[in-house]
Image: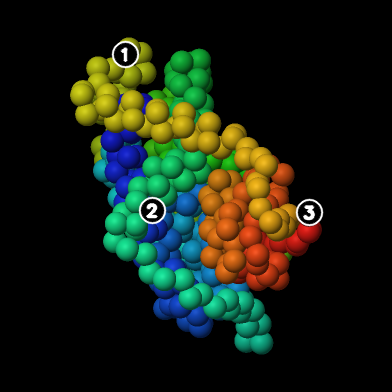
Amino acid sequence: MLGEMAPYILLGFLVAGIMHAFVPAGTMSRHLAGRGFGPVFKAAMIGVPLPLCSCGVLPAAVAMRRSGASRGASTSFLIATPQTGADSIAATWSLLGPAFALIRPVAALVTAFAGGCAVGAAEKSADAPQACVVASLESRPSFGRRCLDALRYGFVDLVSSIGAWLVAGLVIAALITVYVPADFFAALGDRPFIAMLAVLVVSVPMYVCATGSIPIAMSLMLKGLSPGTAFVLLMAGPAANFASFTLISREMGRKSAIIYLAAITAGAMAFGLAIDYLMPSAWFALDGSHAAGHGACMHLGPVQAVSAAVLAVLLIYSFIKRNRHKHNISTDMTYQYTVKGMNCPHCQASVAKAISGVAGVESVDVNLKEGSAAVSGSHDPEAVVAAVRAAGFDASPVTTD
């Protein structure tokens, strides 16, 4: 599984890094203000290719909302982004075939548009978004610097963000493939609707990234579940979890959170049923290589083998980097901040980037596990708090000597 997915995942990481480095900051938010179908559709189109998991998308969506985006557009972005992405589309094609890879972004786009429009219709006219505008005078980096930033984000930050979930998905898929009997899902295989409901009950609270869900879905199909049921896992698993529901309830209201969850579940079920009952089953049949991998070792080509080795090295490095803690920041003036709302390394990188842009900041050490940030340099603590809040998090300063 790792060998088949690795070339596509590495390509997805590269595309994601280019998008991150060369799309100007703030461009997306400027196009998502106002009501109507336009901002909702734009938010869905922007979110589909972005390779952010359901925790990584939360601060981005909150920042969007606080910068003036409507609730409908913010909800559309929240639904579309974690369901798919450049990396997961490529990985889906490699393991599940072109039909799954093409239908997955279409389903994310339709579901996000419907959910965003529903939230927009329920939004009261007096309920305007609370804009939080922070001036930014940072200079535009050079082309070479942006290329390096693209590589760093794609192959370091993003690997750190979804690497654990990718590995978890591969491990779960391997355990399912080896230990679950072939006829375990035979009973549910004849009743796709009941199987989809069962998968929803498990996948909605489950926390798995869009790429990590692919090998799990493939293994379940090999054990007898229908393609539509596997598709429900692919869509509902990455998009919804308790953390996102709680944050959306706080930022946009419980009504918006309920519509958000209903849109994800209804969209996943609708497309799952369409796959099982309206589309040719041959489109979703796994080829012989996947079936062979179920019972025997696969022979990887040189590109797959090299890609798998590179991806393995990146994953190992990301795990080492993720658990490394920096200490003893030497500075004339150090401030300690409590930061709330960080859930993953992507959140950690967003906070660090926001604080680094504040005038006078010399170095930043963001601790994900402790929810803190140590900032050195002669700077204004209120500016740091404002920058962190503009990025979608909450912060409060604690001065230290």
Question: Where's the N terminus, which quadrant?
Answer: top left
Q: Of the residues under marks 2 and 1, which one precedes in the sequence?
A: 2
Nearer the camera: disc 3 or disc 1: 3
In the image, residue 333 above or below residue 220: below
Q: Residue 305's spot in the image, x, y percent? A: 27, 24
Q: Is residue 334 above or below residue 325?
A: below
Mark 1 surroundings within 10 Å by alpha-carbon count, few (fewer than 14), some (14 through 19), many (20 or more): few
Q: Which comes sooner in the sequence, label 3 or label 1?
A: 1
- Asked whether residue 145 is in view, the answer is yes
Question: From mark 2 to mark 1, how far is it between C-alphas?
Answer: 38 Å
Give the residue drawn at x 70%, y 58%: 333
Circle number at residue 401: 3
Q: Nearer the viewer, residue 229 or 50?
A: 50
Q: CA distance from mark 3 to mark 1?
A: 59 Å
Q: Label 3 amino acid? A: Asp
Task: Give the label on residue 5, or none.
Answer: none
Q: Which mark is residue 149?
A: 2
In the image, taking residue 199 as reference, residue 311 lies left or right, namely left
Q: Nearer the viewer, mark 2 or mark 3?
A: 3
**Mark 3 packing: few (<14 Cα in 10 Å), some, or many (20+)?**
few
Residue under label 1, please give it. 297
Compared with 179, 186 (above or below) is below
Query: Is 299 on the left-hand or right-hand side of 294?
Result: left
**Which badge, 2 or 3, comes first in the chain's sequence?**
2
Q: Nearer the viewer, mark 2 or mark 1?
A: 2
Q: Position of residue 16 (x, y in %)?
A: 36, 52
Callout 2: 10 Å neighbours few (<14), some, many (20+)? some
User: Tag 1's secondary structure?
Assistant: loop
Q: Residue furthest top?
A: 296
